[in-house]
């Protein structure tokens, strides 16, 4: 190692640790920590499982919007009318990925229905001021997958 190499490596490690701490401590966009966003994301899914609409309503901003392959930029009111009834048949969310990125959290989960059906989705939750302002849903697949391993499903 060149002279001073270990000292430079230590300084680089300290800088990386400082940057990670700053990232985890405060997001520039929202003034909240990414850990706070993760907690809010988890709380929103927990509200569905607990059938606690009042808890979810406190987490969702008045100017909230929801988009999925079936829903285009729904308002908060329409979201609750259309999507909240799904809480009745949802039994659990098993998180595969919870990835914070500034004012967003990327969530991949496997959901379980009360009748035993399972499916996987990915959602992007965007936060502002301690509330969810936007959700984008990307539908995944049923579990078990309809296609055999290495195969595919023909769709007309």
Image (spheres, rainbow, N blue to C red):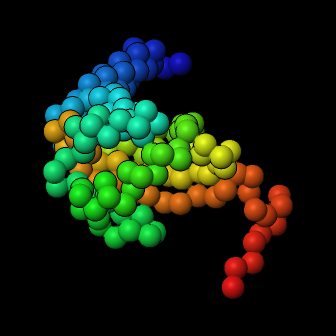
Residue 18 image offset from top left, x and y in percent? 30, 22
Query: Residue drawn at (42%, 52%), measured in percent from left and top?
Result: 85
Q: Is residue 56 above or below residue 20?
A: below
Which image quadrant is residue 54 in?
Answer: top left
Percent x, y of residue 55: 29, 34
Q: Is residue 142 left or right of residue 28?
A: right
Q: Residue at x 54, y 53 (%)?
A: 121
Q: Residue at x 59, y 51 (%)?
A: 120
Q: Is 68 on the left or on the right of 131, as rendered?
A: right
Front-most of residues 156 and 49: 49
Nearer the observer, 31 or 84: 84
Relative to 131, residue 155 above or below: below
Residue 153 percent across, percent down from the top left? 75, 72
Going 75% across and 62% down the picture, which residue do you hit? 146
* Nearer to me, 19 or 67: 67
Q: Is residue 17 visible?
A: yes
Report which quarter residue 104 is drawn in.
top left
Q: Is 147 above or below relative to 18?
A: below
Rendering coords of residue 17 (x, y %) = 36, 21
Choose top left, top right, bottom left or bottom right for residue 82.
bottom left
In the rendered image, the quadrant that contains the C terminus is: bottom right
């Amino acid at each position: 190692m060149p002279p001073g190499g270990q000292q430079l490596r230590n300084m680089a490690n300290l800088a990386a640790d400082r940057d990670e701490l700053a990232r985890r401590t405060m997001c520039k966009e929202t003034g909240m920590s990414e850990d706070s966003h993760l907690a809010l994301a988890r709380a929103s899914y927990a509200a569905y499982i607990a059938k606690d609409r009042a808890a979810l309503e406190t987490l969702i901003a008045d100017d909230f919007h929801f988009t999925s392959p079936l829903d285009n930029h729904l308002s908060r009111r329409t979201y609750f009318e259309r999507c909240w009834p799904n809480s009745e048949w949802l039994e659990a969310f098993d998180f595969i990925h919870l990835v914070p990125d500034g004012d967003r959290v990327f969530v991949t989960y496997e959901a379980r229905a009360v009748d035993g059906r399972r499916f996987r989705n990915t959602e992007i939750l965007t936060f502002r001021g301690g509330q969810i302002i936007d959700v984008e849903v990307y539908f995944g697949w049923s579990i078990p997958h309809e296609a055999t391993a290495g195969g595919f499903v023909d769709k007309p």
